[in-house]
Image (spheres, helix red, strand yellow):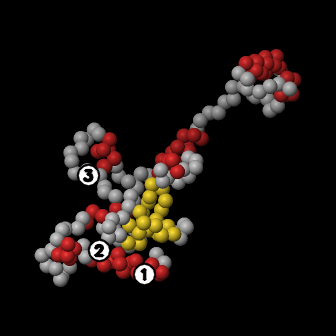
Amino acid sequence: MPERFWQFAYSSAAFLHNRLLNSRCLNSLPHQELFGTAPSIATLYPFGADAIVHVPSINQQHKLVPRGIEYKLLKPLMLGGWLLWEPSTNKMVQLARIIFPQFQPTANLSGHISKGSLGHVVNTMPLGEVPTERLFAAENRAVGCLLLVKDVSIPEHLSRALSGPHHEKWREACLAKLDQMATRDVWEAV
């Protein structure tokens, strides 16, 4: 984050400090002492955290436009929402409906998973231990052993097709293809 945002870093640190345990408030949180209610720690994110805001499909010009805009968190707002900075346009905005991808909850896999299920296979699969080089070399050897046979020698252009030994069959094939294109209105012959 650029240095010009130091005041937001300080404000964000104070906001977090007041919602976490510290040595001055032994039995409760500072926020709880001040306001009488416990703060929600589910919405505490650090300064500079990556944030993504969904762009509704109504506002998109075409399908290849990104479906989200990336921001950086500057500070939480007292009445809800966050103050964010968009690095690509260098603008600050206040938004409430945001996704923080680094802090998304993970799936709870503590329940029973049967050994025949896909979940069991995925969870027990050893990652990074597949001998890809050995498999690739074996695959290349197998491909190298394949016998390549040409069924029919295909002429490179029309004049060779019509002057070769199978010229009548090539002429019939070309006329059949032209008739097929004409019946399907693919193009007009000129």
Horizontal and vertical percent position of residue 15: 30, 75
Callout 1 touching callout 3 (CB < 8 Å): no
Check disc 3: other Cα within 10 Å, few if <14, some if 14-19, many if 20+: few
Given the image, on which type of amino acid does mark 2 rest?
Leu
Query: Which sits earlier in the primary sequence, circle 3 or circle 2?
Result: 2
Q: What amino acid is at disc 1?
A: Trp
At horizontal 42% and vertical 66% (from top left) the residue drawn is 94
User: Crowding at label 1, few (<14), some or many (≥20) Cα neighbours within 10 Å?
Assistant: few
Q: Nearer the viewer, mark 3 or mark 2?
A: 2
Sequence order check, earlier mark of 2 and 1: 1
Residue type, label 3: Asn
**Residue, disc 2:** 16
Image height check: is 102 above or below 47?
above
> Residue 112 versus residue 103: which sits nearer the camera?
103
Gap in angstroms between the C-alphas marked 1 and 3:
37 Å
According to the picture, the residue beneath numbered tag 1 turns out to be 6
Q: Residue furthest bottom?
A: 24
Mark number, residue 108: 3
Q: Nearer the viewer, mark 1 or mark 3?
A: 1
Q: Secondary structure at mark 3?
A: loop
Residue nearest the observer in this picture, 116 or 99: 99
Q: Position of residue 172 (x, y in %)?
A: 78, 17
